[in-house]
Image: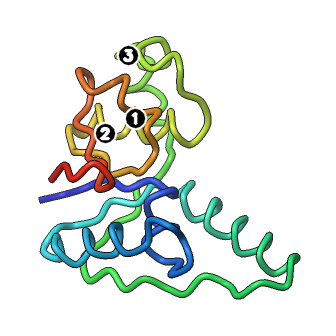
Amino acid sequence: MKKLVDSAFLLSAIRSRDPHHWICAGYFRDHSQSTWVIPAIAYFEYQAAQARLKKDAQEPYRDLFLPRWEVYDVSLDLIRKAAELDLVNVFERLHGPDLICACISRIEQIPLVSCNDTFNHYAAEIEVVNPLLGVA
């Protein structure tokens, strides 16, 4: 089964000092047979977080081994599909990377795994899995 992940979840799973680390890392472990879909923009969010840590002379994030993963490109095809479905208006409370994740989840019909409660408002539009709430 495929699962789309946002950067908030990824960073919590990777950073052992994060207050949600053990729950998120456990979710990864418990769903190790899944294919993890990572939006390309999440890479840049991860790198920005790394740069902030380096600037503040803090320990960088460690890598997270994902045996099965694929990168989802933010492409013209994604933009066209989102426009056809009017997803910018469907997800009007979201912007930036959160909007992109919601659009991917809706277009591809795959659950979005996130610790970000801003997606809760759209549970009728997309399947949202928040490991902090114990939702499988």
Of labels 1 and 3, earlier in sequence is 3
**Which secondary structure lies at badge 2?**
helix
Residue 136 image point, x, y percent: 15, 53
- In the depicted structure, whether residue 110 falls above or below residue 92: below
**Which secondary structure lies at badge 1?**
helix
- Circles 1 and 2, Cβ within 8 Å, touching? The answer is yes
- In the depicted structure, whether residue 8 falls above or below residue 123: below
Q: At 45% across and 20% down in the image, what residue appears?
A: 91
Residue 98 image point, x, y percent: 51, 39
Residue 16 image point, x, y percent: 50, 81
Residue under pointer 1:
102
Left or right: residue 127 compared with residue 5: left
Of labels 2 and 3, earlier in sequence is 3
- Circles 1 and 3, Cβ within 8 Å, touching? The answer is no
Q: The N terminus lies in which quarter of the figure? A: bottom left
Residue type marked 1: Ala
- In the depicted structure, whether residue 17 falls above or below residue 86: below
119 vs 17, nearest the viewer? 17
Q: Which mark is residue 105?
A: 2
CA neighbours of label 2 inside 10 A, class few (<14), some (14 to 19), many (20+): many
Q: At 50% across and 86% down in the image, what residue appears?
A: 63
Q: At 51% across and 16% down in the image, what residue appears?
A: 92
**Which secondary structure lies at badge 3?**
helix
Left or right: residue 12 compared with residue 4: right
Q: At 60% across and 82% down in the image, what residue appears?
A: 61
Residue type marked 2: Ser
Residue type marked 3: Glu
Residue under pointer 3:
84
Query: Mark 2 or mark 3: which is in front?
Result: 2
Left or right: residue 99 compared with residue 59: left
How much space separates mark 1 and mark 3, taking CA atoms?
A: 15 Å
Query: Mark 1 or mark 3: which is in front?
Result: 1
